Amino acid sequence: MPSFYVTTPIYYVNGEPHLGHAYTTIAADVVARFQRLDGYDVRFLTGTDEHGQKVQQSATAAGVTPIEFADQVAAKFRAMADAVGATYDDFIRTTEPRHTEALKKFWTLLADKGALYSDSYKGWYSVRDEAFYGEDELTTKDDGSRVGPSGNPVEWVEEPSWFFKLSDYGDKLLAHYDAHPEFIQPQSRRNEVISFVKQGLKDLSVSRTTFDWGIKVPNDEGHVVYVWLDALFNYVSALGWPPEEGGLYEKYWPADLHLVGKEIVRFHAIYWPAFLMASGLPLPKRVFGHGWWTVEGQKMSKSLGNAIEPLALVETYGLDQFRYAMLREVPFGNDGDFSKQSVVHRINSDLANGLGNLAQRSLSLVAKNCDGKVPVPGELTPEDQALLNAADGIVPAARASMNDIAFGKLLEGVWSVIGQADQYIDKQAPWALRKTDPARMATVLAVLVQTLRPIAIVLQPFMPGTMARLLDQLGVPADRRDFAHADPKYAVAPGTALPAPQGLFPRIASDEIGLTITETAKVTKS
């Protein structure tokens, strides 16, 4: 069985989980579920990044030790992953001994390879971003203060440091990007990274001495490892590196997909592959940087009170409805705006009026007119065959879209078939055929049942709970719900008894959700 390794970034514990964290986690979970259904042995990793100056400062402000602070926030990130239905195989924390020991060995390997040297660092550093910036990347505000590309303040830092010879890897990185055009996606992120590398890379400070909340540098414990070198190595340390024969590292590395927010693509597409090149370890196959979310037109922030908890949205809209809306609303990779109106529209239009209505109409007619059993079809007309052919093409088209991490395109393709099925049932009018041509009615309903089957199978990664209920209502056995069994030869046999149909997606009345997203955030927070 082929393997597939997908990761989220490990989330920084200086703050609580918000919509952006949920978005990445849901996306990674959809990929993981999809690949499992397609016959892959999947490893899905998420976790938390718990070292660094910002965490130490946040802990001090909260009146607790850094590890106490990390424990509290890490638990919330794990709860968030569970709340959005993430089927992760491992949740790694950078404060765990397995990571600490592996990172020290990786540092030693880099040192033995001659990739590190000791010097002093002078330059601009953003504590909030845990990132070093060059003078040309800064913006001077009206009050004279400097901010980095993220808009976060920077401060001048001078301290002894260990450096990684990043300047040695510019040409090697560009050669890798050229040989592997899929390595950085989408294209806009790839263009940004290539442009940055072509400007020339400077050696990277990879240790700090002005604080001590981090992993000690081997043989130089006055230094702690720079938080990004620490954090990036989680993808390998979580697999039990250094490798053991038959272990997870041998089975799953290199990673097939790192899913990250666009603000950290540089770390994953420049620093991370350079570290791996220097160590002699294989590079991941792909880094995908998705866009940012605003909330009702505003940037998420604590001061605005709109950094909403994902759990509040799950409780308000339903888990599967929330998952669907998040990945359907904007092309994955683009920035998007989250609003109550858009979510309600998706639930009512796509789910309740679309798929839900199609399933309810079709299965209710079977229950009423066919003794609740899958009908026996007669001779197929061109219209019947056209709809069945469209349904048969759902899984191959979904594979192509998933290969591009194009969730929206995948869902558009499925809803195109749903729309075709809606037109078919309206035109064929099986409720009228009951009196004039019962045999034809049976054929039409049989075609609809068999059309719904691959639709439900391919939508499982997005809406696992609801699609499980739909597959139950379609009489599909639990062991025939993977993509291989979407083939027509595995169609539910005529005469199979079906359970009484139940509604899948309740409509949401416009006045049922009276709170704005911002108000929901404030209520949840309180």
Image (cartoon, grey):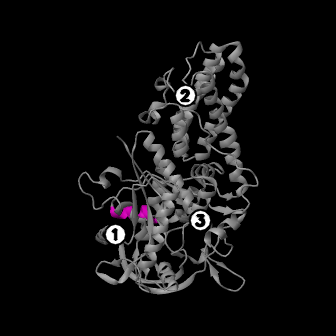
Quarter of the rendering occupied by the C terminus: bottom right
Q: Is residue 345 left or right of residue 253?
A: right
Residue at 56% over, 20% down: 375
**Label 2: which residue?**
392
Which residue position is annotated with label 3?
309
Q: Bin the neighbour count of mark 2 within 10 Å (Cα to Cα): few under 14, some 14-19, many 20 and up.
A: some
Q: Which residue is pictured at 28% across the width and 80% down the height?
A: 219
The residue to which callout 1 is attached is 103
Q: Nearer the viewer, mark 3 or mark 2?
A: 3
Q: Which residues fall within the magenta stretch?
A: 270-279
Dot 2 or dot 1: first in sequence order is 1
Amino acid type at image mark 3: Glu
Give amino acid for label 1: Leu
- Point out the tag, 3 or 2, that comes first from the N-terminus: 3
Secondary structure of the residue carrying tag 1 is helix
Say which of 194 and 96 sits in front.
Answer: 96
Q: Secondary structure at mark 3?
A: loop
Q: Indicate which label's residue lies in the foreground, 2 or 1.
A: 2
> Residue 16 at what x, y percent from top left?
54, 70
